[in-house]
Amino acid sequence: MAASATTTSVEGVIAGGAAGVVVETALYPIDTIKTRLQGFCNLYRSTAGAIGGAASSLIRVPTEGYGSFLLRDLPFDAIQFCIYEQLRIGYKLAAKRDLKDGENALIGAFAGAITGAITTPLDVLKTRLMVQGQANQYRGIISCAQTILREEGAGAFLKGIEPRVLWIGIGGSIFFGVLEKTKSILAERNSRKVRIL
């Protein structure tokens, strides 16, 4: 029983890692456009996009600042996975069968787009804090939010929403599509091993 749980955990890590690398690599250009719309034009001026997907988790937290990273990504992950799982469960019950790859990808796109829209204000805050550099225009997250609201109005919190929703929607499709396919492949491989033994 414990070996089965460990195998499932390992499969989940492998599937999640594969899905993350694919989506980050594929969608880097849209993220660049979104970031530029949110307030900084020269943030990504290198060939880092080619290796960005694989290295993003190692680079992202130190450069963005841990607080702003958590502010955006923890709610994002919680919301996206919750929406995805609930939609997937509901669709599976309605269809009365296992879902096809395209269906998982479509549900992932929908979950991603909704989550991208909901969390755009947090992404704007994260981007502004990240790109302020040595200027230290903001003293923290609350200072950043107050300054944006005072100087630009509430609409500034939705800057970059269109490319973000597009990017996260496509990313959700790719991520959850690859995730479910990889899990399926690994489960089938393990099933064959068990039948051989």
Image (cartoon, grey):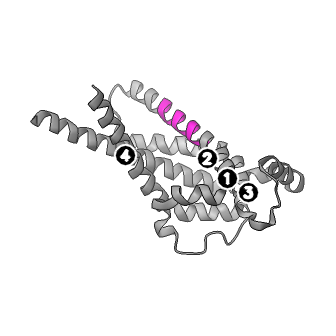
- State the SS at label 2: helix
Give above or below for 99 relative to 149.
Answer: above
- Quadrant in the picture for the N terminus: top left
Q: CA distance from mark 3 to mark 2?
A: 19 Å
Precedes in sequence: disc 4 or disc 2: 4
- State the SS at label 3: helix
Residue at 67% x, 44% y is 71
Is 143 colored magenta in this rendering? no
Find the residue positioned furthest to the right.
150
- In the rendered structure, the answer to whether residue 66 lies left or right of residue 21 reads right
Q: Which residue is mark 2?
A: 116
Q: How many marks?
A: 4
Precedes in sequence: disc 1 or disc 2: 2
Q: CA distance from mark 1 to mark 3?
A: 18 Å
Residues at discs 1 and 3 in contact (Cβ within 8 Å): no
Q: Which residue is mark 1?
A: 161
Q: Which residue is mark 3?
A: 129
Q: Which residue is mark 4?
A: 15
Magenta stretch prevailing secondary structure? helix
Residue at 61% x, 70% y is 44
Residue neighbourhood size for the residue with mark 4, other residues' Cα within 10 Å, grouped as few (<14), some (14–19), many (≥20): many
Q: CA distance from mark 4 to mark 1?
A: 28 Å
Amino acid type of disc 1? Ile
- Quadrant in the picture for the C terminus: top left
Q: CA distance from mark 4 to mark 2?
A: 22 Å
Give the residues in magenta.
Answer: 76-87
Amino acid type of disc 4? Ala
Residue at 77% x, 48% y is 141
Residue 181 pos. (x, y %): 33, 44
